[in-house]
Amino acid sequence: MDDVAQAAGVSRALVSLVMRNAPNVSDKRRHAVLDAADRLGYRPNAAARSLAERRSNTLGVVVNDLHNTFFADLVDGIHEIAQANGFRLLLNTAWRTDTDEREAIEAFLEYRVDGILVLGPTAEGDTLLEASRNTPLVTIGSSFPGVDAVVNDDLRGGEMAAEHLVQLGHRDIVHLDGGNGAGAAHRREGFAGVMESMGLDIRVVPGEFTERSGLAAATRLVESGSVPTAVFAANDLAAVGLIDALTVAGHSVPESVSVIGYDNTHLAHLQHIGLTTINQPRVEMGRLAAEIVLERLESGRRQAVCHVVTPKLVVRETTAPPPVRVIQRIESGI
Amino acid sequence: MDDVAQAAGVSRALVSLVMRNAPNVSDKRRHAVLDAADRLGYRPNAAARSLAERRSNTLGVVVNDLHNTFFADLVDGIHEIAQANGFRLLLNTAWRTDTDEREAIEAFLEYRVDGILVLGPTAEGDTLLEASRNTPLVTIGSSFPGVDAVVNDDLRGGEMAAEHLVQLGHRDIVHLDGGNGAGAAHRREGFAGVMESMGLDIRVVPGEFTERSGLAAATRLVESGSVPTAVFAANDLAAVGLIDALTVAGHSVPESVSVIGYDNTHLAHLQHIGLTTINQPRVEMGRLAAEIVLERLESGRRQAVCHVVTPKLVVRETTAPPPVRVIQRIESGI
DNA sequence: CCCAGACATTGGAGCGCTCCAATAACGTAC
DNA sequence: GTACGTTATTGGAGCGCTCCAATGTCTGGG
């Protein structure tokens, strides 16, 4: 910067003004500085700037799982709002573990980003709460007391999935759980609530938000000889893995077993998959979250807000009435 | 930091030493400092640190497209190496456009990251070359003179794809181009080379590395009434989109038309897709690239290196011999 | 009991920038 | 030509840290 100032024959302060294109700089000097900067290949040092300015004009985004395109859609929405408000985005990924997530947040805190968005949080609420004390922070996908959040009504979503299957005539339904995945607990609750109110068995098998988890669950179900007539998978990724393994094992979907997912990611609407699922307005959620962070940054609001968006059932080709023999068995059993 | 020093009854310098856990600090002081830091909720300021240290211990990763899980695998590999060497990762995404990519690189340069990895570069080489003058920079997916790179032998990969289809008996083959996508040009070249040497028509339709592009191309082919017996799509994403639209239009894959992709992403091996494709050792490529960046950072090497890994054909269910009537037509035409 | 040599601790300069109060330059009206 | 209100420009302090040379503290051998 000193070099540029010297080369342009002005003071360091003026260079600073030009670089931030302040209003009150004469065209003559502005050009002189810009020229010199260009000639010397000068590039402002963001670290020094954010140190002096005490703000970084940057938002940190913690992506729970880079392999899940659900998060890519969220980022699209976030970027849109950040861009429009002159903020840069910095991403970090957490490989679905709470330790990596904490590390990512910690890193952003140390970099002094102006706001943090945690997509699909896996960590405990107190980590997030503590982090949000110093920096505006919003979670997407699940909410914690005292922390801003944008969530889908996962309880309702779980209900919708269960209701859809029950309405098709299914009685033997398994829920493939999402483990510590964001929103998984509520989806399970919603499912369980419906099943209970219908007087049906609540069968839940452990899992997580991955394709592999779906594969493993299917294998277990097949091997145990207790394949149900329908499965509600905690997310699309798991659903796809499940369908895969089920098909390989000779259980066709939906003829022999119906499968419903959650998220309505790109995967789900592929013709060759045609996954029935619960839609979350992903891009919209990203936008909303970014707006909440920026609003808090500006207003200094202390009270947490939680924005709930509504899920929607999307029926495609992986769900159908249960196979006939099963219906007969049930009927004769009455 | 001053507060912590005061609270612990030591100098600022000592706090600094403790925070970086330097060796020669007495246990007594170390605990005093750590306690105070904890009590006050002190968190080192990374911007100030990197300013003073003149290095950030951070690598910047520019991801061309967050929706393409190909890049997620690369990041896995990069992270592994970075982690092992005490480096943090910071990601940025480029939405497949060269302007966004340039901006992302520019941002990393301003943040003074220690090294930059550009996954699937879209921008011109000179941008990258210029950036790499100040900071170790490596591209993955395509290479530019003077810039470190890790690439797959895309020319050979394109050849393999074409050869596979020709060997199955196809004569009427279309290449769905990858546009400005990394490696697309070489894949096309490889394809064209084989077709030419076989005396076959070189049909190329424009496209890019997205599902949507595949959909659009299929629609165009169908509408023009010139659906070939086989298509080589520039990447898996496009291949999947293509298959989707083809199926909807009543052209079953592979019975009526064969499709081969490129990358061997997670998508490809899903049972319901079972995409024949060309494999790239993704995680391995990520590791390699990270190693190259770190090596250059340490050695200050000036000469660019380019590491080429070999592609591999993975045959699944989307390719088969062409439908019989076509073979007959060709035979009778001889 | 003193002193060399190891180990611990500290003050202060400096990293590259922004911010602010102060000064310089410029018009314009009288 | 002077005084005044603008608009441009500048020096210097300070952001929170690390680094280095200097100082302080503690051993154990003579």
Image: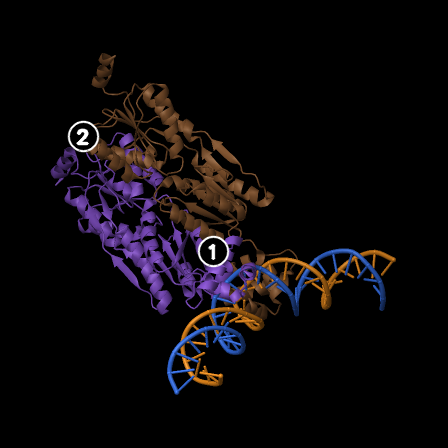
Chain colours: A brown, B purple, C orange, D blue
Q: Which residue is more in the foreground, C25 or A155? A: A155
Q: Quadrant of residue B212?
A: top left
Q: Is residue A27 above or below residue A206?
A: below
Q: Is residue A314 above or below residue B184?
A: above
Q: Which residue is mark 1?
A: B107
Identity, as a three-letter code, of the amino acid under mark 2: Gly
Q: Residues within 10 Å of mark 1 (few under 14, many from 20)?
A: many
Q: Chain of mark 2?
A: A
For image coordinates 46% across by 40% down, the residue present is A139
Identity, as a three-letter code, of the amino acid under mark 1: Ala
Q: Which residue is more in the foreground, A242 or B17? A: B17
Residue A238 visible here:
yes
Residues marked 1 and 2 touching at CB (< 8 Å): no
Q: Position of residue B124 (x, y in %)?
A: 39, 56
Kindly indicate whether the residues beneath marks 1 and 2 are on one polypeptide chain.
no
Q: Quadrant of residue B289?
A: bottom left
Q: Which residue is more in the foreground, C6 or A207? A: C6
Residue A314 visible here:
no
Q: Which mark is residue A250?
A: 2
Disc 1, SS? helix
Q: Position of residue A267 (x, y in %)?
A: 33, 36
- Position of B273 with respect to B323 (left or right) is right
Q: Residues within 10 Å of mark 2 (few under 14, many from 20)?
A: few
* Quadrant including the N terminus of chain A: bottom right
For image coordinates 22% across by 19% down, the residue present is A326
Q: Is residue B70 above or below residue D15?
A: above
Q: Position of residue B59 (x, y in %)?
A: 40, 58
- Position of A70 with respect to A328 (left or right) is right
Q: Position of residue B75 (x, y in %)?
A: 34, 51
Q: Chain of mark 1?
A: B
Q: Which mark is residue A246?
A: none
